[in-house]
Amino acid sequence: MRDIQEVLLHLSRSPFRSRIHLKGKELDYLRSKGMDEVLKHAAEFIEKRLAPASPRNDGKQTPWHNHPVFVAQHATATCCRGCLQKWHQIPTGRMLTAEEQQYIVEVIRGWLSRQEEVPREEKNTRS
């Protein structure tokens, strides 16, 4: 697994991934529930949707909206096993280890923390 800050920097240089931002109801949800609660949800989503060796609907199992973790997963390439392999060198075809699942949650934490720091006015102007 890669260094989280290095991965986040690399992802921020991707034309596709760098356009994804937390805004609206997902940002409000993060701010109202708090990082700890949202990361509990992240751990549950990862365990159910990514950890199996052959996840159901792999490549399409992560919605784009309605929870800050879903948005973060797309921004951090932790949305499906193919992206995990490409961006994080976590192989497909086998169950994720507890360490890999925690790594994914920490990548999501890093991205959410950066999103949470952007002033509200700037967030509201992004489309």
Image (tube, helix red, strand yellow):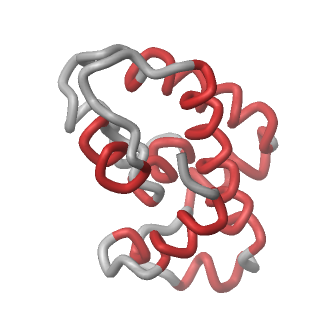
Q: Front-most of 122 and 87?
A: 87
The answer to whether residue 59 is left or right of residue 7 is left
Which residue: 27% across, 30% down? 92
Labels in figure, total = 0
Residue 2 point in image, percent of width and height: 55, 53
Which residue: 62% across, 39% down? 103
Residue 24 point in image, percent of width and height: 56, 61
Residue 86 point in image, percent of width and height: 30, 52
The answer to whether residue 38 is left or right of residue 104 is right
Q: Quadrant of residue 80?
A: top left
The answer to whether residue 82 is left or right of residue 27 is left
Q: Front-most of 114 and 124?
A: 114
Residue 74 point in image, percent of width and height: 39, 53
Quadrant where the image shows the C terminus: bottom left
Q: Front-most of 67 and 96?
A: 96
The answer to whether residue 115 is left or right of residue 46 is right
Which residue: 20% across, 37% down? 59
Q: Front-most of 70 and 12?
A: 12
Q: Work out whether 46 lies above or below 65.
A: above
Which residue: 77% across, 52% down? 31
